[in-house]
Image: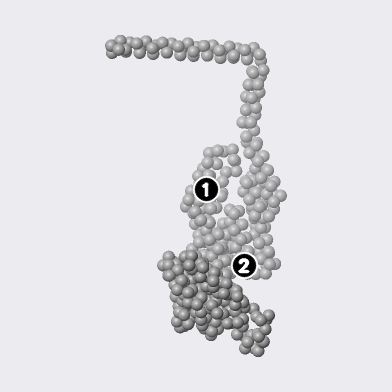
Amino acid sequence: MLAHNRSRGAAALLILTAFGFNLQAHADCAGASVKDVQKRYANAQALDRAGKPREALGAYVAAQEYTCEANPVEAPAAKRAAAIALPLAQDAEQRKDFEAAYQLYADGGHYAASDRALMSLVRAKQDEPGVYTRAREILEYRTSPAFQSNQKVQLAVTGAYAADPKNLAEVERMPAIGAERALKAEFAAFNEQYLREFVEFTQARPEDLTDQAAVQRFGAGQQAFHQKWPNDRLKASRDALSLTQSWTSLMRDEAAAKKFAAQRMQRIEMRVGTLTRSFHRAPELLDAAIDYQRLQNVDDATKAGRVKSIREQAALLGEQAQSQQRFILASEYFRVADLDDKAGAAQEQARQLAMTKMQPDIDRMRQQAEQLQKEYSDPAKVKAMQEQAREMQKAMQAQQKANAGSNAKKADDLEKELGL
């Protein structure tokens, strides 16, 4: 990275010189001082002697930074960096740490090998637009005349380098291939059987939370669903659509970008339609439909209008569930509709319903408690219970003594029998 920064500084210097800017004055120079690079070179040598090759390499690269006057340590720093970097990069490449390998090769001026490791990184992370962007910038720079000029000292050490045009061509195809693969992944993720089963267990949730058997059955069903479908298929679908958008934004081919953007919008509209028409009996799936709507590339007013339509649908379904005394379900619909007051009221209705069903048990327990309190408040009954407890204790103690005597007699008889 330091070498790349140095190259950019040198490129800027060449441009300024070409346009006739006066760079004679040291005060106008943006490069490092000779004293600075000499200190870095001395530090690199110290790290080298200390057996710290990775740290030494970084210091040798830093010593090659552009200076306003001739850099007296650039050539020896490049030579030593090339020697140190090669085994480090080869080891990283063998371990498939291509991120480190391509940079280490570059730090040592081994650009053909760096390209190879960079392409391995691109192929290993073909669904990461950030890797594509970085690779494209690096390869485009290495095909430029400025690269040959800026890295001439390194290339004098490691040998001539010519960028392979096939590498950049392969990288340039990545956005279209990535977008196509993302749309296929989205299609595989959006599974209607998953949605049907999600609706089924949502509808099976008992409203009567005092029915322990029903609550246990629902819990078992929910656990079975998550074992069968361990991942959130709708989140995977939306992630794939977001990735499609990322690839589309990086396309230089305007026609291809428009094609994939249209396909993505069509896919989103399909998902929203499916969820709102066929799977609206689960509030969470209507909420997911809102998340899909927010992925659309439309103006804020249009997007807000479409979200509002789904919220209105959720509100109507909430009213319907409430009229059927399915208060927990109604509360969830109202949450999706962004009607928190109604959601809270429905929850309170669910609580009151549960309390009503529990009231007979509560009354019975209260009566039992009152009866016990009455009995324990009668001194005669308390005294009789105490006396009964003492008699029981005496009986237990007598039984223990009898058992102990019997055991002792049996032991004596056995000793006599054995002649002990």
Number of numbered discs on residues: 2
Q: Position of residue 62 (x, y in %)?
A: 56, 73
Residue 249, above or below 145: above
> How far apart are labels 2 and 1 at the CA level?
32 Å
Q: Residue at x 69, y 46 (%)?
A: 345
The kind of residue tagged 1 is: Gln
Residue 93 or residue 252, whichever sits in front: 93
Task: Indicate the secondary structure of the residue bearing disc 1.
Answer: helix
Residue 420 seen in the figure: yes
In the figure, is residue 222 to the left or right of 335? Answer: left
Residue 117 or residue 204, whichever sits in front: 117
Q: Which residue is mark 2?
A: 296
Q: Residue at x 68, y 49 (%)?
A: 343
Task: Tell me the quadrant of the picture where the N terminus can be found.
Answer: bottom right
Q: Residue at x 30, y 12 (%)?
A: 420
Q: Residues within 10 Å of mark 2 (few under 14, many from 20)?
A: many
Q: Residue at x 54, y 62 (%)?
A: 237
Label for residue 24? none
Residue 37, above or below 322: below
Residue 103 or residue 277, whichever sits in front: 103
Dots 2 and 1: beta carbons under 8 Å?
Answer: no
Q: Which residue is mark 1?
A: 222
Give the mark nearer the N terminus: 2 vs 1: 1
Task: Indicate the secondary structure of the residue bearing disc 2.
Answer: loop
